[in-house]
Amino acid sequence: MRARLGRRAAEPVTDLVVVGDCNPDVLVLGDDVTPAFGQEEKLVASISLAVGGSAAITALAAARLGLQVALVAAVGDDPAGQFMLAELARESVETAAVAVRAHCPTGMTVALSRGNDRAILTATGAIATLTAQDMPDTLLSRARHLHVSSYFLLERSLGPGLAALFSAARAAGTTTSLDTNWDPAGKWGDDQLAEVLAQTDLLLPNEAEALRIARAATLQDAVGALTRTGSKIAVKLGARGALCGDGLGQHLATPPPLTPVDTTGAGDCFNAGLLTGLLRGLEFPEALALGCAVGSASTQGVGGTGRCVDLASARDLARQVTVRPAG
């Protein structure tokens, strides 16, 4: 993948098209958020409703960074779906390609968060009905970059057509990226995922996901294995920052020390920052710093979009990110 993403300087474009999950997050925060069965009641610090779904969070964060963003997803014809569409539209995310399923509930997630650790419960609902056929040709034709979130939640619906969709996008000059997120089935991909990765310009896992997808013992081995197809990779390391790599070398970005309020969606905000940097012409290590800045800033609020920063604020914070060659 070129260090600079995107194309079409002379015609109307959508900078970023994000495909994937779109659902409200019910956020439960506190020092002890572990449920006690036996009909016991616990008090927690807070419970709130927020924009959720990795794709929706990435789309909203990128829009706040100044990109023109469209979301392709599926929701139900219910209050949860209406909440998501209204919140995204309010943030200038284009939602015309979000399919509304009349007889399927909107997916929902409950995130139990204590400091820098979380447990997540998700009912997929309409999320798992999204297919490659839900991507409008007109939207794909004007996209500079196509990003897919939560592959494993969509493995059976979107997965079968995703390699062909990525191939068509790349043939038209659109670059591609993939964040698989966690695999609830614990299988971590098969030949179908391998075909998708062969059409992926940039892979965006966290450390645990990279190790499992690559079936590797060390992070360096995982990065090496996952970049042999010619793609680039940026691995999220939590509070330790992020590692990027391609066939030429690796760089480690260390973020400024911040005490997290809530880490929900930090990785999705990292994705938005990194993609924004690349789409604005930054080289890979510089874009990595911007991704770390946006991801770190997001941990200072509740929910994945509670502290999505604008580009000026992200650039200021990126100056405090240290990037050096890894190894």
Image: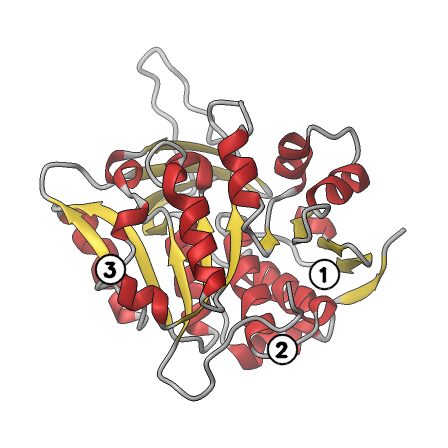
Q: Which residue is mark 2?
A: 315
Please name whichever residue, 204 or 48, is drawn nearer the observer in this view of the structure.
Answer: 204
Q: Is residue 104 left or right of residue 39?
A: left
Q: Considering only vertical position in the picture, is 282 above or below 96? A: below
| Colour mapping | secondary structure
Residue 108, position in %: x, y? Answer: 29, 39
| Marks 1 and 3 close (CB-CB < 8 Å) | no
Task: Quadrant for the N terminus, please.
Answer: bottom right
Q: Which mark is residue 97?
A: 3
Decide: few, some or many residues near mark 1? Use Cα within 10 Å; few <14, some 14-19, many ≥20: many
Please name whichever residue, 314 or 5, is drawn nearer the observer in this view of the structure.
Answer: 5
Q: Considering only vertical position in the picture, is 50 above or below 216? A: below
Q: Nearer the viewer, mark 1 or mark 3?
A: 3
**Residue 69 occupies quadrant:** bottom left
- Give the secondary structure at mark 2: helix
| Sequence-earlier tag: 1 or 3 | 3
| Sequence-earlier tag: 2 or 3 | 3
Tell me which amino acid carries mark 2. Answer: Arg
Q: Is residue 197 left or right of residue 308?
A: right
Q: Which mark is residue 255?
A: 1
| Marks 2 and 3 close (CB-CB < 8 Å) | no
